[in-house]
Image (cartoon, rainbow, N blue to C red):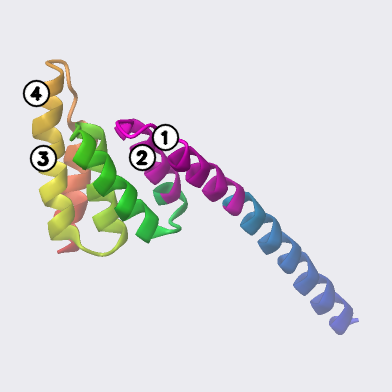
């Protein structure tokens, strides 16, 4: 009886993990397709695709590459903040703080109604991680 329950539990976990990996790979695949089809000056597609992978905490090498390309085309508060998120995900809180601060400064330049509260929270989290 115990073996049956253990076997059933193991099977269920295997199915759940497989389903999660399939969903993840679809998101990764869509992000890669978006980047492959992006116009040379489309900084936002690179940034949003990097955000998808970053939120799933997967393919961080692609995240770094895509954010670098996005920022090379146009620096914005959005891609600078994502670069900070990338550095937090890779355990580099000092680098993350640099990009969060740049993001806040850029946000204020881009929009007089910019609200830095989320980024300020991220800066506090990065400081606490140092």
Q: Quadrant of residue 16?
A: bottom right
- What residue did someone put label 2 on? 46
Mark 1 or mark 4, which is nearer the start of the sequence?
1
Q: Residues within 10 Å of mark 2 (few under 14, many from 20)?
A: many
The answer to whether 102 is drawn above or below residue 2 in the figure is above
Q: Residues within 10 Å of mark 4 (few under 14, many from 20)?
A: few
- What residue did someone put label 3 on? 102
> Judging from the image, what secondary structure is the residue with disc 1 in?
loop
Mark 1 or mark 2, which is nearer the start of the sequence?
1
Mark 3 or mark 4, which is nearer the start of the sequence?
3
* Labelled pair 4, 1 in contact (Cβ < 8 Å): no
Between tags 2 and 3, which lies in front?
A: 2
- What residue did someone put label 4 on? 109
Magenta stretch: helix, strand or loop mostly: helix
Q: Residues within 10 Å of mark 3 (few under 14, many from 20)?
A: some
92 left or right, relative to 44: left
Tell me residue 82's x, y (percent). Answer: 28, 43
Between tags 1 and 3, which lies in front?
A: 1
Tell me residue 127's x, y (percent). Answer: 13, 55
- Image quadrant where one finds the C terminus: bottom left
- What residue did someone put label 1 on? 38
* Labelled pair 2, 1 in contact (Cβ < 8 Å): yes
> Judging from the image, what secondary structure is the residue with disc 2 in?
helix
């Amino acid at each position: 009886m115990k073996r049956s329950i253990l076997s059933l539990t193991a099977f269920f976990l295997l199915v759940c993990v497989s389903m999660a990996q399939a969903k993840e790979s679809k998101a990764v695949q869509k992000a890669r397709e978006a980047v492959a089809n992006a116009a040379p000056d489309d900084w936002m597609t690179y940034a949003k695709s990097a955000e998808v992978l970053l939120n799933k905490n997967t393919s961080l090498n692609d995240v770094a590459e895509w954010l670098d390309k996005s920022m090379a085309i146009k620096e914005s508060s959005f891609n600078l903040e994502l670069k900070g998120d990338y550095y937090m995900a890779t355990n580099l809180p000092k680098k993350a703080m640099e990009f969060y601060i740049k993001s806040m400064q850029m946000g204020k330049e881009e929009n007089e109604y910019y609200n830095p509260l989320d980024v300020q929270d991220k800066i506090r989290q990065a400081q606490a991680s140092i």
